């Protein structure tokens, strides 16, 4: 059988000759529709490799408009915790702020602040807001066994009603010289939190890839092994925006079945699958329910 040779090229073999242009870089739009529900201002995904993407990389990529995919080379709990870090890193409004009861100790408060890199915690009794504790309140506190109720700000607490816009929140924050604004309903139940830090991040990263709540988008890898369903459940619980079935050969029966199974369970979560190199493999994965290949 006669072997036919075809010419092949790589990136270094191709040059684009500049032509006359009427387009300024500032006017260009390179955004791309990754899935029907995810649009990226920067069409870049970071690899789901343990030497590439953990929470820090995913946050950095999402701030620029791309999507980071947290690798799966660790325990289910650890991977879900990384997703949680990304989702909690910034938000237009934090819809489920971390809280503590008045009976918590300063040690509890310091641990929570250190874990999530936050400078304050709303204090609640059940759903009702009773105070707020910030770094300034405990700056010189040395007795970690004392209760947060002894240090929290509870009198003349500045709050805003649910539905307050970011522009309205900025005016309140500036007027009262505060950095955190709890949002409450008519029963004084805590419903959200707006912070100066999150507002500043929105100004610093206007092209960030974010969900409808203003939280950064993040993907996470799952395999097709025994723990895939448990891993997916933990990642969805943590708020992941896309589950990525990453395998070296995506056009296989196990991957197709895993795609069908995950999409059947999590219809509101995008499923991204790869790798494939043929049109047939792409068609089969789309038929199995993949949202992106």
Image (cartoon, grey):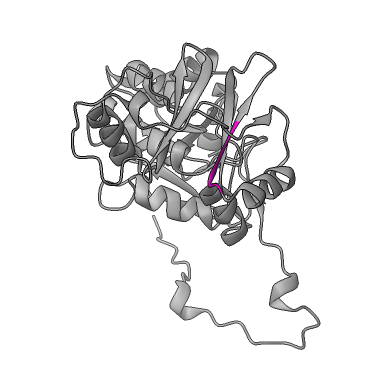
The x and y percentages for residue 170 are: 67, 49
Horizontal side of residue 224 vs 210, given as left or right = left
Horizontal side of residue 59 vs 17, given as left or right = left
For the image shown, how many numbered marks are present on the structure?
0
Give the dominant element type of the magenta stretch: helix, strand or loop.
strand
Tell me the quarter of the image containing the N terminus: bottom left
Q: Determine the image quadrant of residue 3.
A: bottom left
Residue at 42 percent across and 25 percent down: it is 99
The x and y percentages for residue 34 are: 61, 44
Residue at 42 percent across and 38 percent down: it is 120
Furthest-right residue in this view: 22
Residue 164 highlighted magenta (yes or no): no
Front one among 187 and 223: 187
Q: Determine the image quadrant of residue 276.
A: top left
Residue at 52 percent across and 54 percent down: it is 63
| Range shown magenta | 178-182
Furthest-front residue in this view: 155
Front one among 14 and 5: 14
Can residue 61 be seen here? yes
Q: Determine the image quadrant of residue 78.
A: top left
């Amino acid at each position: 059988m006669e072997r036919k040779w075809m010419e092949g090229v790589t990136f270094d073999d191709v040059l684009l000759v500049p032509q006359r242009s009427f387009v300024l870089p500032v006017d260009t739009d390179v955004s791309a529709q990754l899935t029907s529900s995810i649009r990226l201002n920067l069409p870049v995904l970071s690899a789901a490799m343990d030497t590439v993407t953990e929470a820090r990389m995913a946050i950095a990529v999402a701030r620029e408009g791309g999507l980071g995919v947290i690798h799966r080379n660790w325990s289910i709990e650890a991977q879900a915790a990384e997703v949680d870090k990304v989702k909690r890193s910034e938000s237009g409004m934090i819809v489920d702020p971390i809280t503590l009861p008045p009976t918590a100790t300063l040690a509890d408060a310091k641990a929570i602040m250190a874990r999530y890199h936050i400078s304050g915690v709303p204090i609640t009794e059940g759903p009702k807001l009773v105070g707020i504790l910030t770094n300034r309140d405990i700056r010189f506190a040395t007795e970690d066994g004392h209760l947060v109720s002894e240090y929290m700000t509870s009198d003349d607490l500045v709050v805003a009603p649910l539905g307050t816009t970011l522009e309205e929140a900025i005016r309140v924050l500036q007027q009262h010289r505060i950095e955190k604004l709890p949002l409450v309903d008519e029963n004084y139940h805590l419903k959200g939190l707006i912070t100066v830090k999150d507002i500043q991040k929105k100004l610093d990263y206007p092209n960030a890839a974010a969900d409808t709540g203003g939280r950064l988008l993040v993907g996470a890898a799952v395999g097709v092994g025994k723990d895939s369903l448990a891993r997916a459940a933990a990642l969805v619980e943590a708020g992941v925006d896309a589950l990525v079935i990453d395998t070296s050969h995506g056009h296989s029966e196990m991957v197709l079945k895993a795609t069908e199974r995950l999409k059947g369970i999590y219809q509101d979560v995008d499923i991204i699958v790869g790798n494939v190199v043929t049109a047939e493999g792409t068609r089969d994965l789309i038929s199995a329910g993949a949202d992106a290949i």
